[in-house]
Amino acid sequence: MPTITHVVEDQTETLVSYPPVIGQASAANVRIGTPAVSMPDEGSEDAATIDTVDTTISAAANAGDKSITVASASGITEGYQYYLDTDFGPLVVEVEEIESTTIHMTNPLPTAVESGTAFKGYAISHALTAAETADVGQSLAQWDATIGGVLYRWDQHFLVVNDNINYTLNGTRLVDLQPIVRELRPAHDETFEDSIAAAWGTYLVPDFAEKGIRIERINSWEPLEALHSTAVVAHLLSQATNANPDFRDFWEAKYRKQSLDLLSNPLWWYDADDNEAGVPDGDPANRPFTTSWIHR
């Protein structure tokens, strides 16, 4: 499932996006609209930053390899995607770790690549200002980039969230709830810290947005642990290229059901102070109660 990027309120974080076609841009722009700043008119775009990495593979690599050696690692950024310009077309890889000129990738190569193959960046980014992230809520970046002489446009939704995100799930608790994660543990994530964070951003944050649940108002985090742990399993399976598709679909469906059951609970919607209950007058859930365990 697609990831909705979330950035922290009042922070100057970098928003990264990738064009709808793979290729290094010659020019790129962006317009940003958030709860704090209105979307500029067309023609008032800011210039975006283009990843201009352009190097080569210095040693042949085989299908299944999770590392490659490049002529120069200058400008290559961990967590970013790059592409190998192979004879069969561009092959996208994600950089997990950099050691000198050795690039460790998130997933193994699906095919062999020859020495001398071009390794190029294609990310487009924008350094968000504190003014743009001053208020929490749903936000939009409208990008354009010229690639191979053709202008491409695309939208990227993101969320500005309060920095008081204190989910309680940790590696020990995750293993208690979902022992299967021992078999899925990524080599680079011994404590599951990265996987827990990725599942939060990929699964729970978009579901909160869809339900209108404001993250900054969450008061009791423990009830989310079971759902969060299921999301971690689904996330790990989505990243495992050798995972059984039926098994992957099973965990995706399991997460969806848990999410629907938990987030549809009226307690997630009720707030006596700001009239955001969102339940009909005739609904029993509209009666006053004192256990508002999720909203402040």
Image (cartoon, helix red, strand yellow):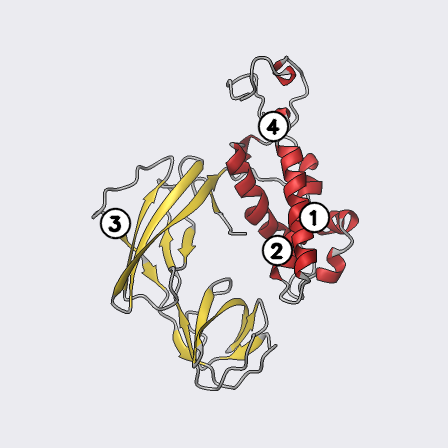
Q: Which residue is mark 2?
A: 194
Q: Which residue is mark 4?
A: 268
Farthest residue to the front: give it.
Answer: 246
Q: Contact, CB < 8 Å: mark 2 with mark 1?
A: no
Q: Which residue is mark 3?
A: 45
Which of discs 2 and 3 lies nearer the camera? The answer is: 3
Which of discs 1 and 4 lies nearer the camera? The answer is: 4
**Looking at the picture, does residue 16 appear above or below residue 140?**
below
SS of the residue under disc 4: helix
Residue 293, position as x, y percentages in the image: 66, 26
Relative placement, left or right, of 265 versus 163 is: right
SS of the residue under disc 1: loop
Q: Contact, CB < 8 Å: mark 4 with mark 3?
A: no
Q: Residues within 10 Å of mark 3 (few under 14, many from 20)?
A: some
Q: Residues within 10 Å of mark 1 (few under 14, many from 20)?
A: some
Label 2, label 3: how far apart the Cα atoms are: 34 Å
